[in-house]
């Protein structure tokens, strides 16, 4: 199909882009890699009056590592660029990035576009939730920091305002005291997660012969109407030695408080069961990497 007509703008700077999207009266969407919005436009599942293409704004690209080891990732950085960057020192990122889409999607798709789209079956939201990322958004009104735990508010719905552009995503520094992992079951045709789980564990060293887990974060995607933190699982394991039995018991709470999706790819019972299995596998893998 051919999309409905729209105006196309390609600003050369972030300030120019912010000026364009702050203008009233037009249904304006921001285009970065285009791997989500362009298929929707071609199928006429979405329409816009104007597209503002920020994909070539250099200040929105690249990965910077601060003196403390933390990362700042430009929103227009592609998956392929991330695969070749130091951010893969975070094992859950190294696990997830090569599984996203196909070569074309990884070469064109961007981290900022992925989370702004807020697809409830996208891989990166679970990883960013487990890493406790911060999203930096800017508008003509100024800049603000949005905790990733407050960013996803519904299917294809985020906390981003219509006049804001994501400029970067900030991630924790790699540490020998932390281990992480991402595991998923994918819908084979699309590559989207039927269920995906990222786990990050930080330990305090040995106490009376056992390694206690001080910090644990579990992000889940593909299961509910948005990616979420499995807080009941985290609470059950925080401050424990994360033994196999404890992990298995905690994983049963993977969907606590969540309305589990049911669709043509997987029914509610299957997704619930797979969420439990993948939570257990992700935590076990992260636990092994944090030893």
Image: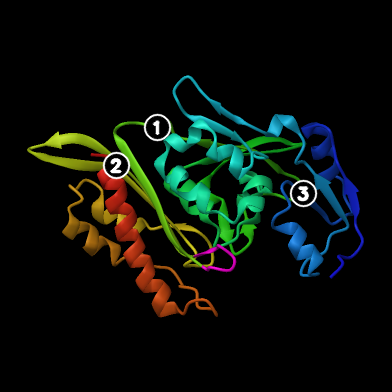
Please state the horizontal and vertical placement of residue 50, each as a whole percent of the image.
Answer: 87, 53
| Vertical arrangement, residue 93 with respect to residue 222, above or below | above
| Residue pointed to by mark 1 | 174
Please state the horizontal and vertical placement of residue 105, each as a whole percent of the image.
Answer: 65, 52
In the rendered picture of this protein, how many numbered marks are placed on residues? 3
Secondary structure of the residue carrying tag 1 is loop
State how far apart marks 1 and 3 are (Cα). Answer: 32 Å
State how far apart marks 2 and 1 are (Cα). Answer: 12 Å
| Residue pointed to by mark 2 | 289
| Vertical arrangement, residue 65 with respect to residue 93, above or below | above
Q: Is residue 17 left or right of residue 131?
A: right
Please state the horizontal and vertical placement of residue 138, each as a whole percent of the image.
Answer: 70, 37
Which numbered disc, 3 or 2, marks the residue closer to the eye? 2
Would residue 255 be visible to someone looking at this image? no
Residue drawn 56% across the image and 31% down it: 72
Q: Which residues are magenta?
A: 187-193
| Of callouts 1 and 3, the N-terminal one | 3
Residue 60 magenta: no
Q: Is residue 9 left or right of residue 253?
A: right
For residue 30, the mark is 3
Q: In the image as oriented, which residue stretches furthest toward the front?
A: 103
Would residue 52 be visible to someone looking at this image? yes
For residue 260, the mark is none
Q: Quadrant of the C terminus?
A: top left
Please state the horizontal and vertical placement of residue 188, each as a whole percent of the image.
Answer: 53, 68
Depth check: give the residue in front, 283 or 25.
283
State how far apart marks 3 and 2 are (Cα). Answer: 38 Å
Q: Quadrant of the N terminus?
A: bottom right
């Amino acid at each position: 199909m051919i999309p409905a007509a729209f105006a196309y703008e390609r600003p050369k700077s972030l300030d120019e882009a912010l000026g364009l999207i702050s203008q009233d009266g037009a249904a304006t969407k921001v285009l970065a890699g285009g791997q989500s919005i362009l298929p929707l436009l071609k199928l006429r599942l979405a329409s816009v009056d104007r597209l503002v293409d920020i994909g070539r704004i250099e200040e929105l690209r690249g990965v910077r590592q601060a003196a403390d080891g933390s990362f700042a990732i430009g929103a227009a950085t592609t998956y392929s660029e991330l695969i070749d960057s130091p951010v893969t020192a975070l094992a859950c990122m190294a696990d997830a990035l090569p599984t996203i889409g196909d070569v074309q999607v990884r070469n064109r798709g961007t981290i900022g576009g992925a989370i702004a789209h807020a697809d409830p079956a996208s891989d990166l939201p679970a990883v960013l939730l487990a890493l406790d990322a911060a999203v930096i958004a800017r508008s003509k009104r100024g800049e603000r920091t949005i905790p990733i735990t407050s960013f996803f508010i519904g299917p294809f719905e985020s906390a981003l305002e219509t006049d804001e552009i994501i400029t970067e995503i900030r991630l924790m520094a790699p540490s020998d005291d932390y281990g992480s992992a991402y595991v998923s079951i994918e819908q084979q045709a699309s590559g989207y997660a039927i269920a995906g789980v990222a786990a990050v564990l930080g330990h305090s060293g040995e106490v009376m012969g056992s390694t206690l887990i001080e910090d644990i974060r579990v992000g889940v995607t593909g299961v509910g109407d948005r990616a979420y933190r499995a807080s009941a699982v985290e609470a059950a394991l925080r401050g424990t030695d994360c033994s196999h039995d404890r992990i298995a018991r905690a994983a049963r709470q993977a969907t606590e408080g969540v309305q589990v999706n049911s669709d043509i790819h997987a029914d509610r019972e299957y997704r619930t069961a797979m969420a439990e299995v993948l939570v257990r596998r992700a935590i076990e893998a992260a636990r092994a990497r944090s030893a």
